[in-house]
Amino acid sequence: MRTPRRVLPPIARAAVLLAAGLCFVAPVRAQEEPELIPQQQATPEPPKPAIDTTPPPTATGPLRPSLDFQRWREMTARERQTFVEGAVQSMSALALRMRSDLEVGGRVPPESLAAVVRFIHDHYPKFPPSSYLREMESIYGRADGQNLSMAEAFEQAFRRINAR
């Protein structure tokens, strides 16, 4: 006995062939979506090279009047050391003077006494001037530090060293 063979009507055959064809064509025509987590990070912009801050061996003439990075570059190692020593001495003298005024007079109201004591503590040098000088050299050795004036660079070095 022979089993009857079903014959698909021509429209059904065309629909099956069309569906099979679309299954193979769809991945080719699909839109590619971006990755959720990129595999390769974008390369960061290369850092701006810092200008050399090595002090000249000897003085080359009168220094500029402004206390900025250009003047720092013109200063010899001894002149830089003298600048930092003077700044440390002036900070120390200010803190000691305020401390002695507090001890003798006692004119500061109690509500602001804590702020004055904190100011004295924060502005009294705790390390030798050579530490502050090395920190200033490292600040001026970076490109972002070369935008600071000498006073700003010293203040930043002072805060960093005293925070240790």
Image (cartoon, rainbow, N blue to C red):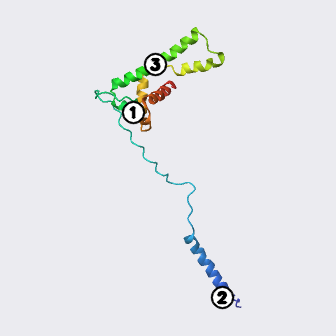
Where is residue 22? Give x, y as percent.
Answer: 60, 76
Q: Is residue 131 above or below residue 69?
A: above
Q: Quadrant of residue 128?
A: top left
Query: At numbered mark 3, what does the secondary structure look like: helix, strand or loop?
Result: helix
Amino acid type at circle 2 is Pro
Where is residue 97? Give x, y as percent.
Answer: 51, 13
Q: Dot 2 corresponds to which residue?
A: 10
Q: Dot 1 corresponds to which residue?
A: 69
Nearest to N terminus: mark 2 or mark 3: 2
Where is residue 113? Give x, y as percent.
Answer: 62, 17
Amino acid type at circle 1 is Phe
Question: In the image, what residue occupies the spot 60% across and 21% down?
Answer: 115
Neighbourhood count class around disc 3 (C-alpha, 10 Å): few under 14, some 14–19, many 20 upward: some
Question: In the image, what residue occupies the spot 43% across and 24% down?
Answer: 131
Q: Dot 3 corresponds to which residue?
A: 90
Extreme residue in the top direction: 104
Q: Quadrant of residue 89?
A: top left
Question: In the image, what residue occupies the spot 52% across and 21% down?
Answer: 123
Nearest to N terminus: mark 2 or mark 1: 2
Where is residue 57? Give x, y as percent.
Answer: 28, 28
